[in-house]
Image: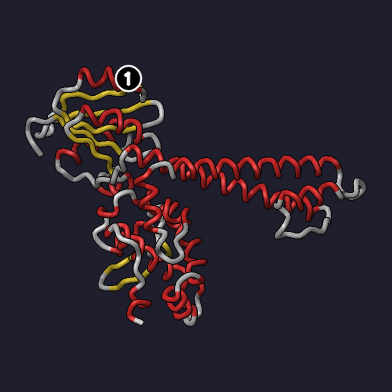
Amino acid sequence: MQSGYTYVGLDVHKKTITWCAKKIDGTRVGHGTIAANRAGLSQWLEQLPRPWIGVMEATLFTGWIYDYLKPHAEELKVAHPLMMRAIAASKKKNDKIDAQKLADALRADLVPECYMAPEQVREMRRMLRFRNLLVRQSTRMKNKCGGLLMELGVEYNKKRLHQKQYFSELVGGFDPEIVPTSVISLLGMSRNHVELFRVGQKHLIKQLNNDPRLKERVARLQTIPGVGEITALTWALEIADPARFPSIARAVSYCGLTSAQIESAGKMQRAPLSKQRNKHLQTMLIEAAKLAPRHSEQLRALHERELKRGNRNRATLTVARKMVAHLLAVDKSGKDFEDKTVKEA
């Protein structure tokens, strides 16, 4: 850290930002609370001593504040909330103290920094996560359709229920004495929502594919057996820069595929899967790992070996970890996947 800089801690909230500015020796040169909007930040920047280095914790509101302040700072960092809590734990806690602790951690170069993806990547990531939301809502509506029919004891073909023609024929042939008009209306509403969600999903994926660099990267990742378009898109946008993972173990941990480790007095035990993970990647990789053995001899053999030990969940996690290794290798190398086991055979 350099003596000529002002070190600023920002405690970010939905409507306000509490800040504290200190010199390298710990002398406080300013503090206060400002409105969490662009006008408030502009006025605050005018009175802030330059040059300055800032830090804020990662929150839902951090992204736009980071993008707005970044051009005006010599350096701007985003701190990991859980790690900061462990470093700066205290009996008394409020916004003013939090801002001071952030500034002190920055002065001492003790900030547990988070990776901040480029703005364009975060924009596309937001679109993909919204697409996943539409998928979940569509599934809920489909389940609701089946539930309404089961409540009334109506027989139907589960596999064909959500096909447009079959659904129309089914609803059109209902006996009014068995199926009330209110249920027919609810079924129609559910069907319309499912169709709306389907169109929305396709539109968002089409928009993401308009980016040539992302499209090329996704196509390369899809050369891995068992990796489809959505899995590849999720990996590319959630990981952003694969170079930030120095090892496969780090990537596997980030994806939430390892258990928490507890070690004390020479004794070590494994806890359930850690909650400190990227939940979007974890969900997508586990779902992909359930289907991947159908497309790869290597993954099928790996799955069968773990399955013999009597735990299907363990087998799925092992396949998912192997997929992370393949994804990271292909992404870092910039080359298509090559199955060495097939080549050697």
Figure disc tally = 1
On screen, residue 47 versus residue 239, left or right, reads left
Badge 1 crowding class, 10 Å Cα cut-off, few under 14, some 14 to 19, many 20 or more, is some
Residue 89 shows in this picture: no
Task: Residue 2: give x, y in percent of width and height.
Answer: 8, 36
Q: Tell me the residue at 16%/24% (across/down).
A: 29
Q: Is residue 109 above or below residue 223?
A: above
Q: Tell me the residue at 47%/58% (across/down).
A: 228
On screen, residue 44 versus residue 120, left or right, reads left
Residue at the spot of label 1:
40
Identify which residue, 234 or 315, lies in the foreground. 234
How are the colours assigned in the image?
Answer: secondary structure
Q: Is residue 17 above or below residue 129?
A: above
Name of the residue lying farthest toward the left: 3
Identify which residue, 96 or 317, lies in the foreground. 317
Q: Amino acid at mark 1?
A: Gly
Identify which residue, 92 or 127, lies in the foreground. 127
Task: Residue 230: give x, y in percent of width and height.
Answer: 47, 53
Classify mark 1: helix, strand or loop: helix
